[in-house]
Amino acid sequence: MSAVVARGVAAGGATDRRPPAGSVVAAAGPVVRSSGLAGATVGEVVHVGPHRLLGEIIGLDGPIATIQVYEETAGLEVGDEVEPSGAPLRARLGPGLLGATFDGLQRPLDRLAAAGTWLLLPGRGPATVGAGSGPGGVAIPDVEPAHGTDAMPDERRWAFEPMLEPGSEAGPGDVLGTVAEGPLTHRILVPPDIGPGRVVALERGTYRLDEPIGRLVTPSGEVPLRLAHDWPIRRPRPVRRRLGVERPLITGQRVFDMLFPIAQGGTAIIPGGFGTGKTVVEQSLARWSDADVVVYVGCGERGNEMAELLGSFPELVDPRTGEPLLARTVLVANTSNMPVAAREASVQLGVTIAEYFRDQGLAVALLADSTSRWAEALREISGRLEELPGEEGFPAYLGSRLAAFYERAGRVEALGSPARHGSITLVGAVSPPGGDFSEPVTQASLRLAGTFWALDAELAHARHFPAVGWTQSYSLYVEPLAPWYRERVAESWPERRAEAIELLGREKQLLEIVQLVGADALPDEDRVVLEVARLLRETFLQQHAFDPVDAARPPDVQFALLRAVLAARTGLARALERGSSLGQALEAPVLGELRRTKQWSGDDVVARLEALAARLTELASGVTG
């Protein structure tokens, strides 16, 4: 019995069905056609050729099965054997995920690097194809892709503390017990497709992932319970019910948290052309968001960027726990030179891992960088399948595939007991060619996302980062999140936010006039708007992603800084009313102090900013006529 079928039987999810082997009749890149797979099903995993390349059946036409192969198919020959597994593509879920780095098929990258693969890992030197690899992909001893015994190391033993007594009733999603993993308490769940039944022989002890920790007697028979279980990556994990959003995902980035917030359980897209900072924004979210668990999927990204990410994460310290940030992060790396077909599997793997932690009652941030590379993979596969193309050559089902992905986000009440509320906040980067937001992937994503963070090439060229265009960006979560902000940040947050956006919009209108008649032709009131908007952009919206002080700020500090900038508008207007010239008012030392506030730190920074806001409001008293 193959590893995938054996694991499926143990988890109660798959059946011991071994269809007869087939043979290759045609191959075009990652698309292979096979005959002789009687009884095979769409979605079933197969192994192709002498190197057992991992593939998945995506179509059946009479005796011919169409297979999407997730590895390089160079070297395959007509007549090579195709071995079915009897199970779909599955992710292995359990202790050991946190801190791990996988490829798009849940193969551990450290094992791949040791055998030789595409990705250069920091400190390992140039990657070379190691012994055991062949012309048809990388064959790594003892590493079964996507669902085998070594997706996570099985030699480690975990101290299990049961929460149920033998003889207790248990059903899908119930918490059997816990193990300690890094900063989190990892809940061991009854798999969603098992039970209900009666627990027997559930005992405290140290176990490997595949050792039985107990048994569940169900009407259909006795099922062993383990620390880890498998789940098909294309099937959303069931929940008891979906819930409305209640609180934001705090990112530490001022332009997001104060102007365009995203809810825990919400969705956001970050479209932007080359060089606008999409990857840096996503990495900042991974480092500084207040999610319990971060799942970062690098889908089709450049290898040097992923290598830098993999090298930097172990060195970062989680500000909440003081432990390495990697201890609450799962990284999935599918670089641009890896087989294109595995990109689609990588995002599905990432969201399946996110759902597993969501079901434990945790807040998960899923960062996909980028969904455009996934869409390009769909387009390439669709072309090789000779399907009718949609707009710009993308398949006609692009919108429905994106919708199925984004719909796996949300805030939910998990299955089982005790009651648990968890969430997946999904942020997808989009890479429109030439920065054209009218292209199909961006437009399809816009219809699905609740927050739109548009990256502006002009801002990026002006070295304004994060380069979020405030005139195009929006958030549909402002109204439902307003009660949280009023209670936890400030009663006046909605009004101050609206004032800041109005100020930026008014600045854009005035700049168009300035281009025609010059700034000196404007009345002083409009020049005040331009000066305060510039302060807002440079002091509040600009944020240094690599500065130890300015990289992330808590919401109370963010709001205090916003209020101080807006207080400058009041102070300048009062100075003009009292007869001062705008030039004299702009020379007030307190404005220079405002420009340096981004470097303020310490426990008293909010109080200092509030005192500064009071002085800015009374700026007129310090201006000499």
Image (cartoon, rainbow, N blue to C red):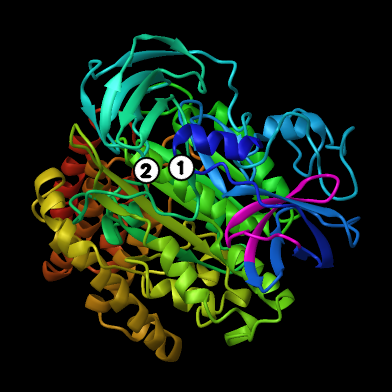
Disc 2, SS? loop
Which residue is located at x 83 percent, y 51 percent?
Answer: 49
Highlighted range, magenta: 36-58
Q: Are marks 1 and 2 in contact (CB under 8 Å)?
A: yes
Which residue is located at x 51 percent, y 45 percent?
Answer: 296
Instruction: Give the answer, above or below, for where 98 lies relative to 404.
Output: above
The residue pinned by badge 2 equals 193
- The amino acid marked with disc number 2 is Asp
Residue furthest to the top: 205
Between residues 67 and 138, which one lies in front from this camera angle?
Answer: 67
Residue 13's disc number: 1
- The amino acid marked with disc number 1 is Gly
* Mark-to-mark CA distance, 1 and 2: 7 Å
Task: Answer left or right for 408 relative to 152.
Answer: left
Toward which corner of the image does residue 524 lie, by quadrant?
A: bottom left
Between residues 584 and 281, which one lies in front from this camera angle?
Answer: 281
Q: Is residue 91 magenta?
A: no
Task: Answer left or right for 141 relative to 287.
Answer: right
Residue 225, horizontal then vertical, whole percent? 40, 25
Of the 4 image quadrants, the one containing the C terminus is bottom left
Which residue is located at x 62 percent, y 59 percent?
Answer: 39
Disc 1, SS? loop
Between residues 157 and 37, which one lies in front from this camera angle?
Answer: 37
Viewer can see residue 547? yes
Toward which corner of the image does residue 187 lie, by quadrant?
A: top left
Label 1 neighbourhood size at 10 Å, few (<14), some (14-19), many (20+)? some
